Amino acid sequence: MANYNKFAIAASDLGGKWTSDFSGAIQYVNAYTGFDAGMDTHASVENFKIGPGNTYHWDLGVASGQVGNIKFQSRKSTGKFSMNGNWQVSFSDIEGKPRTYNAHFSCIKGLRVLWLDNKAFARIN
């Protein structure tokens, strides 16, 4: 049934801001003593802001590491995108090089989800 909830996209469908985020934590405990052995965390957010004239702004922010020593990294780029049919989107610059994503929409009640290479993005109004 999952393949039945896939819809083609057009450039006109992409306007606005699309975001995907993730966070997680791992708590380490010594198996012999039961004492705390530290914690690692990871959080990331990726955004596409699609503007007029097939322009876009992309950014990615990541914070990860052992609690007390968390490192932050970010990347940004701006450019133009084009559609390769109704199932692929090409961006002129993602992390310094052109990038093409397989793309489609899926729908749930009251929401369209944009999928770029099997990663879900929700629209922020």
Image (cartoon, rainbow, N blue to C red):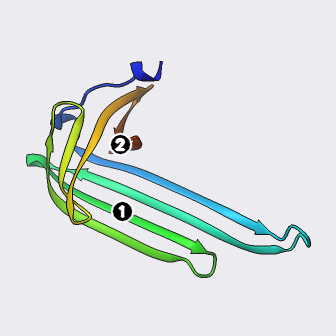
Disc 1 target residue: 60
Taking the image as shown, residue 3 lies to the left or right of residue 103, namely: right
Question: Under tag 1, what secondary structure?
Answer: strand
Could you tell me which residue is drawn at 19 percent across and 46 percent down?
90
* Whether residue 105 is situated above or below residue 28 in the rendered picture: above
In 3D space, how far apart are the residues under numbered discs 1 and 2 (Cα atoms)?
A: 16 Å
Disc 2 target residue: 117
Could you tell me which residue is drawn at 16 percent across and 50 percent down?
51
**Is disc 2 surrounded by few (<14), some (14 to 19) or many (20+) residues within 10 Å?**
few
Taking the image as shown, residue 1 lies to the left or right of residue 48, namely: right
Question: Under tag 2, what secondary structure?
Answer: loop
* Whether residue 21 is situated above or below residue 122 in the rendered picture: below
Give amino acid for label 2: Asp
**Is disc 1 surrounded by few (<14), some (14 to 19) or many (20+) residues within 10 Å?**
some
Taking the image as shown, residue 46 lies to the left or right of residue 51, namely: right
Quadrant, the C terminus: top left
Could you tell me which residue is drawn at 18 percent across and 61 percent down?
78
Give amino acid for label 1: Leu
Quick one: label 1 or label 2, which is nearer the N terminus?
1
How many discs appear? 2
